[in-house]
Image (cartoon, rainbow, N blue to C red):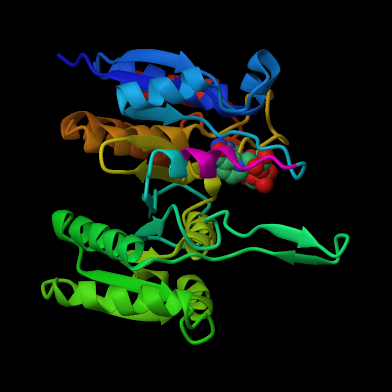
Amino acid sequence: MSSQTITVIKGDGIGPSIVEAAIQVLDKVGCNFNYEYVEAGLTALETTGELLPQTTLDAIARNKITLKGPLTTPVGEGFTSINVTLRKKFNLYSNVRPVISFKGTKARYENIDIITVRENTEGMYSGAGQIVKNEGELAEAMSVVTREGSERIVEFAFELARRENRKKVTIVHKANILKSTSGLFLKTAREVALRYPDIQASEMIVDNACMQLVMNPQQFDVIVTTNLFGDILSDLCAGLVGGLGMAPGANIGKDCAIFEAVHGSAPDIAGKNLANPSSVILASIQMLEYLGMKDKAEKILAALTDVIASGDRTTRDLGGSHGTTDFTAAMLERL
Ligand code: NAD
């Protein structure tokens, strides 16, 4: 019997429909969670005047575990990304983004099983030194990389590799050009790798990594990299397994974690019952694994695998012709 309370942010756009689907799935397997619903993003701005109200921050801090739908950050006009703010505020330094091939998707590859571990608080997304001057003619931003930040994320990646019986960690960088920042990350990563002789460590420059991921993705196992590269590479990885609808992400800190879809609020399909809820369902699986509820995680994964393989009521991005609610019903039947 679990009495764990989960903070739930349904989010914007397709968020509420896919988060609702995931919660139905969690309830169906008997997780017995309590849910505390709070708001963020455009929805919160409209009702409270703030993108990230204090009540939401309090709930995240109190319950430690959050399941979150995508949030729309208004472009420009001084709005800081809510996601970046949350990651920094709660020191969620690891962003774990696994992709696996599901039979039955329209993906270009089979047998993909890659986890991208993205540093989540530093690099180009540190927010430091953002200046626009000379009447809008010159813009600057600062990339901040620390030894401590690099060490903890690379350690996280090797520990994860060890725990999950992975064979190889690829350190992705651009130290040949970004000598100070990416250079420090690579130097630190090499030192950490030496402490894990049981795991093969390899290095790859980010541009080559993009090409290699497209040409020969099966060579990758765990990837560890800095913030911006991890953001881009993990979307590329999602594309290898059938698109953003299949890509979950876990933001993990020392004692707090936020589980979410990698994708955004998909305004082009919002309100049309077209979204694939797999991303948030897969994020829920990550959440269950984090909570040590492996049997329930496996049950949900087996149902998802079967729905997609059989093409039973799948969504358009998966080659089907059904909507979010039908897809969810197919999941619930199997559970
Ligand atoms: P997006 O990820 O919302 O959409 C990109 C494309 O993928 C669209 O064609 C969309 O229809 C499709 N797609 C995304 N999720 C899908 C799903 N579950 N099922 C089927 N198709 C899906 O990216 P965008 O349009 O660039 O961004 C929209 C908004 O989302 C922006 O405001 C952005 O800031 C925000 N955003 C939020 C997050 C987050 O909250 N974690 C992440 C990325 C973007």
Q: Locate the C terminus and report the quarter of the image it occupies.
A: top left
Ligand 1's quadrant: top right
Q: Is residue 79 magenta?
A: yes
Quadrant of res 114: bottom left
Above or below, 53 relative to 198? above
Front residue (pair 189, 236): 189
* Percent coordinates x, y for residue 332 in the rendering: 37, 19
User: Which of 188/140 is in front?
Assistant: 140
Residue under the point 52% across and 41% down: 85
Residue 191 visible, this orientation: yes
Quadrant position of residue 48: top right
Report the residue at 23% width, 62% height from top: 155
The stretch in magenta equals: 78-86
- Does residue 78 appear to the left or right of 30 in the view shown? right
Could you say which is closer to the camera, residue 121 or residue 241?
121
Q: Is residue 69 magenta?
A: no
Q: Which image quadrant for residue 5?
A: top left
Residue 290 point in image, percent of width and height: 24, 37
From the viewer's perspective, is 7 left or right of 56? left
Residue 334 at x, y = what percent?
32, 23
Q: How many labels sit on residues?
A: 0
Image point 52% across, 80% down: which residue? Answer: 178
Q: Is residue 289 above or below residue 156?
A: above
Residue furthest bottom as drawn: 176
Q: Is residue 330 visible?
A: no
Q: Is residue 210 left or right of residue 304?
A: right
User: From this viewpoint, which residue is outermost toward the left?
Assistant: 198
